[in-house]
């Protein structure tokens, strides 16, 4: 896909619902990324989404690089971080169903590939949630790991 | 991420992506007869009702928008209507028109998502929009473009496409100038042309001949195809003001779902949504939408749930034409909102979410704090009727193998575009045969 001259070349997308505790770790990470210089200067755009596939495609279309932060279930301890590099490729076999928004993210990647609407590089940073019940607060393990997740996300964006 | 426990013969769709939200379906067949059908929905409005208590009257428009990423405007509009009713103010003129315009954006976005990415694959024998994109890329590209135009309405009026931030009790934080709406109108003309193509496309699908015994219920407005209004009617004699909703509709708990079901006290199950709106008010469609409906072979009413995809496509045309008409007649109001002074009272509000009538009720104390909140979303009202559709379908098709039964049962659910509205997207299907 051609990189758009009118959009920031790099986007960090936080996926999830802030009303479902750790499911909202994506938006929670964006809240911490917002004050950073790279985001304030517009060099890196921050987008909060619910995981609906066409919105993901809209958000990353025309970008050089997209970093997606999402809750991911991989039978690891809460707060564990998983990194998946996807650019121009579909999700590898077995990935479908790993994310709490699996249908959304997996389908968005596949649909984006079919329509030639993937960014040049797509990195998914998934964190294992501990509690996705109704509520606003992150679980302690996820809250503790949030600083590392934010650092990794900005490092990926500015590589 | 919630999954239901297994049982002897269990078929599971790990992620039924083509419904919005999280749920499960359970079908039990014993000795060749259907014993039980349950659609289990894990739904957040119950949590939000508690969450709203003690909050200021200004907050529900923003808080309830978070219930659903697909239809935040519906939650905002019903919330504002209920609080304005409690306070005793009326929002009309250009501010009301701007609310209708914002709502057009949501209908376009939500219906287009369902038509192209969730429902159409069922009629084309495909498993997903990805498969459809490989076979008919132009159709999927068209869906994305229409949806983006709907987004543009939300961004222009709401400040952003997801969970708009410009809506408040009494109107808006800022109203657009006529000039700002100009570029939007150009895009809407393009959207209208694309939407007419979509009606032609979906009208060509094959539909089973299956009219259902629904009682249709929707918001009622004397001149407008229903979106905003203060009355509710049905095709079997219901004709009430919005404040009478709790006197005629009973919510009840069932063990298998966290969502309350609803029924009319007088007659039981009923259906809200596009089929209801169309069947009750097709005479109020915009001219182009009415013509598109006729050429698509729809009569004055439609009780075939499979044809709901055509009705949604017609409603998208109506939304484009309504939006264009509103912009054409728009004059920027002197103020972006009417003055509001809180007072104690009870207020009721309804509006037509893409999936149907959405009711809110708030009780305010003297300080303008919410002492009680009730939210009745469309999918919860439709849940008994969806289970009824499933029951009728399974009873008529017990001879099918489990996998075929599963696929067709899922289609039966998708006909109603249930918005299960939480963040996670799972629907497990369990079929028990003994």
Image: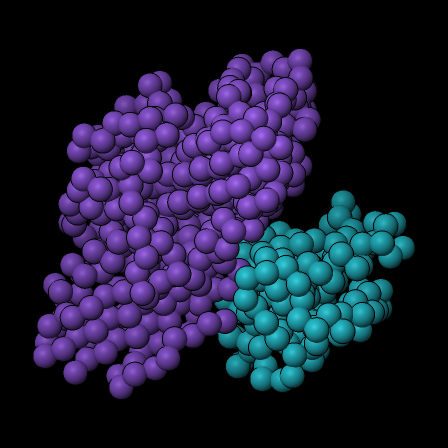
Chain colours: A cyan, B purple
Return the x and y of residue B387 as percentages of the image width and height.
Answer: 25, 58
Q: Residue at x 35, y 54 (%)?
A: B260
Closest to the observer, B10 or B187? B10
Q: Is residue A65 above or below residue A41?
A: below
Closest to the observer, A24 or A11? A24
- A61 lies left or right of B105: right
The extreme front residue here reads: B366
Return the x and y of residue B121 as percentages of the image width and height.
Answer: 37, 58
Q: Can residue B221 be seen in the rendering of this structure?
A: yes
Q: Residue at x 32, y 57 (%)?
A: B253
- B94 lies left or right of B427: right
Q: Residue at x 32, y 31 (%)?
A: B244
Q: Is residue B30 above or below residue B392?
A: below
Q: Residue at x 35, y 18 (%)?
A: B223
The extreme right residue here reads: A37
Q: Can residue B311 be seen in the rendering of this structure?
A: no
Which quarter shows the C terminus of chain B?
bottom left
- Residue A151 location, quadrant: bottom right
- Residue B353 location, quadrant: top left
Return the x and y of residue A114 as percentages of the image width and height.
Answer: 54, 62
- A145 lies left or right of A59: right
Closest to the observer, A85 or B22? B22
Disc tally is: 0
Return the x and y of residue B330 as percentages of the image width and height.
Answer: 57, 16
């Amino acid at each position: 896909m051609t990189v758009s001259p009118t959009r920031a070349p790099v986007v960090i997308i936080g996926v999830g619902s802030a009303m479902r505790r750790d499911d909202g770790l994506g938006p929670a990470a964006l809240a911490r990324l917002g004050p950073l210089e790279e985001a304030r200067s517009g060099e890196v755009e921050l987008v909060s989404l619910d995981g609906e596939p066409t919105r993901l495609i809209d958000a990353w279309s025309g970008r050089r690089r997209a970093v997606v932060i999402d809750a991911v279930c991989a039978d690891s301890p809460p707060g564990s971080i998983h990194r998946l590099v996807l650019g121009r490729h579909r999700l590898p076999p077995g990935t479908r169903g790993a994310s709490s928004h699996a249908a959304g993210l997996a389908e968005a990647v596949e649909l984006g590939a079919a329509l030639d609407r993937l960014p040049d590089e797509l990195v998914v940073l998934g964190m294992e949630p501990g509690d996705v019940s109704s509520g606003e607060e992150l679980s302690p393990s996820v809250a503790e790991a949030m600083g590392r997740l934010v650092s990794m996300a900005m490092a990926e964006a500015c590589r | 991420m919630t999954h239901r426990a297994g049982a002897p013969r269990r078929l599971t769709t790990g992620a039924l992506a083509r419904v919005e939200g999280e749920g499960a379906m359970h079908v039990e067949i014993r000795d060749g007869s259907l014993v039980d059908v349950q659609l289990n929905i894990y739904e957040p409005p119950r949590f939000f009702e508690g969450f709203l208590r003690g909050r200021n009257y200004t907050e529900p428009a923003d808080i309830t928008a978070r219930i659903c990423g697909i239809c935040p405007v519906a939650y905002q509009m019903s919330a504002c209507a209920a609080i304005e009713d409690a306070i005793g103010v009326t929002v009309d003129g250009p501010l009301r028109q701007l609310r209708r315009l914002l709502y057009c954006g949501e209908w376009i976005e939500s219906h287009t998502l369902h038509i192209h990415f969730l429902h159409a694959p069922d009629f084309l024998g495909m498993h997903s929009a990805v498969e459809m994109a490989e076979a008919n890329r132009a159709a999927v590209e068209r869906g994305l473009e229409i949806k983006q135009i709907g987004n543009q309405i939300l961004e222009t009026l709401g400040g952003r496409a997801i969970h708009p931030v410009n809506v408040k009790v009494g109107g808006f934080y800022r109203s657009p100038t006529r000039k700002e709406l100009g570029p939007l109108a150009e895009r809407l003309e393009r959207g209208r042309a694309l939407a007419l193509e979509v009606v032609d496309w979906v009208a060509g699908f094959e539909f089973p001949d299956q009219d259902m015994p629904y009682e249709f219920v929707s918001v009622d407005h004397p001149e407008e195809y229903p979106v905003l209004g203060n009355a509710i009617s049905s095709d079997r004699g219901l004709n009430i003001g919005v404040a009478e909703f709790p006197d005629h509709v009973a919510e009840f708990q069932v063990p298998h779902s966290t969502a309350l079901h609803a029924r009319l006290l007088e007659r039981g199950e009923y259906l809200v949504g596009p089929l209801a709106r169309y069947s009750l008010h097709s005479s109020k469609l915009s001219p182009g939408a009415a013509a598109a409906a006729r050429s698509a072979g729809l009569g004055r009413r439609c009780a075939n749930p499979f044809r709901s995809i055509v009705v949604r496509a017609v409603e998208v045309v109506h939304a484009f034409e309504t939006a264009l008409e509103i912009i054409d007649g728009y004059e920027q109001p002197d103020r972006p909102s009417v003055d509001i002074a809180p007072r104690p009272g009870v207020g009721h509000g309804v509006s037509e979410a893409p999936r149907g009538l959405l009711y809110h009720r708030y009780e305010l104390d003297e300080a303008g704090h919410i002492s009680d909140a009730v939210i009745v979303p469309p999918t919860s009202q439709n849940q008994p009727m969806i289970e009824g559709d499933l029951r009728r379908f399974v009873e008529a098709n017990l001879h099918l193998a489990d996998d075929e039964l599963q696929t067709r049962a899922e289609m039966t659910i998708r006909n109603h575009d249930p918005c299960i509205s939480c963040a996670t997207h799972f629907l497990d299907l369990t079929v028990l045969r003994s």
